[in-house]
Image (tube, rainbow, N blue to C red):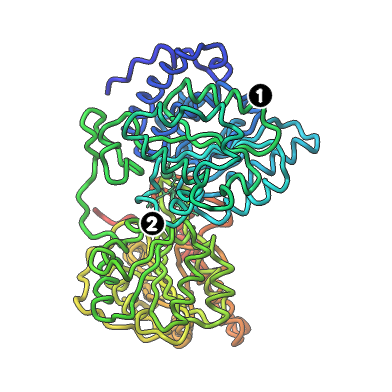
Amino acid sequence: MTRPDTPILDRVAGPADLKRMDDRTLAKLSDELRAEVISAVSETGGHLGSSLGVVELTVAIHAVFNTPMDKLIFDVGHQCYPHKVLTGRRDRIRTLRQKGGLSGFTKRSESEYDPFGAAHSSTSISAALGFAVGRDMGKPTGDAIAVIGDGSISAGMAYEAMNNAGAEGRRLFVILNDNEMSIAPPVGAMSTYLSSLYGQEPFQKMKSLAEGFESALPGPMRDGARRARELVTGQGGESGSLFTALGFDYLGPIDGHDMGQLLSVLRSARARATGPVLIHCCTVKGKGYAPAEKAADCGHGVSKFDPITGVQAKSKPNAPAYTKVFGQALCDAAARDPDVVAVTAAMPSGTGVNIMAERFPARVFDVGIAEQHGVTFAAALAASGLKPFAAIYSTFLQRGYDQVVHDVALQNLPVRFAIDRAGLVGADGATHAGAFDIGYLASLPNMTVMAAADEAELARMVETARGHDTGPIAFRYPRGNGTGVAIPDVPQALEIGKGRIVSEGADVAFLSFGAHLGEVETAASMLALQGVTATVADARFAKPLDMDLIRQLARHHKAVLTVEQGAQGGFGAQVLHALAAEGAFDKGLAIRTLTLPDRFIDQASPADMYADAQLSANDLVLAAMRALGRDAKVVPLRA
Ligand SMILES: Cc1ncc(C[n+]2csc(CCOP(=O)(O)OP(=O)(O)O)c2C)c(N)n1
Ligand SMILES: CC(=O)[C@@H](O)[C@H](O)COP(=O)(O)O
Ligand SMILES: [Mg+2]
């Protein structure tokens, strides 16, 4: 693949080189940087649209501020590719999101230019304020700059941080990167609210900087800018703009692709600011790359692609994605049951609830990036008599954990948690691993916890959850495609707390919880080549446990191994706890819990990550042999 011609970028070893460039050269550098990002992401895949939208902004920040002494914090961090190129990581930029390569997000261990790691949204302002306090208390750190998107600033944590920052009154820069997009088009009343706040005093305060920016915008951006300006400056009898009321000086809106505007505003702000400042930049997600600009998601997350055509390399799967199976099963359940409603936190297509939304738009609620609110909202939907499915990735449900405990479990409200991206997810790495949900849910009184071994099981669990009105219930399933099994047209509900035997053997028993079942079955076949026969059981439930099944496995096998795609303290721990409680270990019992290890696992393919976690079929074979006290070896299956 030919690489773009980048004579100016080739002279950049780090941000210091930008300081020697005049403004016109910085503008040209941006063009080259954009071409480099497109070229690199075409080889790796990744968060293209967001990164393309902040190219000029990233150049301008590094040209004006003094990183790494000044702390530049990208919210989510999915837009950090241009930043990585400029901060000494260009030589590895084509390893983005690959095994052993650069993370797709900012990461402290990767560079001194990444002062605060991210990947979950809306943390940047809190982090920037922490650095500002550190600076003011004498620590060797300069200015703090948070770059946060219009999607991410919709989350409660961003407002908690601004509330605190405004009260602290410390010098701090928040750059609102407003591209009028989240992953899906942004939702929420915030923009409407802000539209009512136009033209009041605080905006006038910074008028000399702001004046003329909006009218200087190119046509298509002018409306967005106006909306954005209205969003922050106030109109129509409101008492004050949101940001100024929170104690920030507001600058903007400015054209986030105009190097001249960016540099002059950033320089002025840097020279004059005494307290918190919000700089409002209007940008275009996917800017400068037509296939991204035109895409419905503005190229938010792309596979490898042909840079000329923009066509992404997507292999034809042999089985449907779990997400789609869930989405369809949910839609079918909604068709049968008018009380079924769905909640997503800014991830309608990621969670598959868009399928139901197409048919039943009034019964699907996108609450924005607001997992905490989404969970409590779902709790009250349940309290009202509806049957809410809160469809949230395992990793993002962590954000709403107190709400799961306090609003759902404690009140025993029948919220159905559809937990996608359970287990290791691949290129997004450790920040997005769905590692902890089994532990954090199964430890809660009233909660029922299931995991789907395949896509047919997932459809059954949707129906099981729909019919479960006596308390909260969760079911987890992984990122990626199912196994290709037939999915029942009208799935039957499972009996709560009952697992199943998948195949019978005599020596060792695997008790699998969830989608690692296929790997377990492979391990059982490999063991057979060594004359060891294994029973394979699918637990289906981590809570309540099928104690009859567990006792039976323990009684009839020399060793039992639990297997799960989750961290320690999950399913295996539940089994150990229950067995210990009934004295099973007093009589001797060979049992092993195969879980993710007690460390975070960096990005790679899911298969490589599970191998790293010692959960491959080979590892299961070795664990079984050791548990039986036999020579630990692996006889590979013939292809
Ligand atoms: C707590 C949390 N919830 C959901 C997500 C998934 N997510 C990643 S980026 C994104 C959209 C962010 O929109 P915005 O901040 O406007 O940035 P843009 O992609 O438009 O540049 C979402 C919903 C996340 N990373 N963290
Ligand atoms: C940055 C972020 O949090 C999301 O864009 C995430 O990468 C989406 O992951 P999926 O591709 O699994 O939907
Ligand atoms: Mg956005």
Q: Position of residue 164 (x, y in %)?
A: 68, 50
For the point 35% across and 73% down, the residue is 341
Q: Closest to the observer: 329 or 591?
A: 329
**Mark 1 sits on what residue?**
271
Give the residue at the far right of this rendering. Answer: 138
Of 217 and 202, nearer the camera is 202
Residue nearer the viewer, 608 or 337? 337
Q: Secondary structure at mark 2?
A: loop
Task: Bin the neighbour count of mark 2 within 10 Å (Cα to Cα): few under 14, some 14-19, many 20 and up.
Answer: many
Q: Residue furthest front?
A: 237
Q: Which residue is mark 2?
A: 347
Which of pointers 1 and 2 indicates the residue nearer the eye?
1
Q: Is residue 416 visible?
A: yes
- Position in image of residue 283 (x %, y %): 41, 35
Looking at the image, residue 362 sits to the left or right of residue 195; the answer is left
- 110 left or right of 129? left
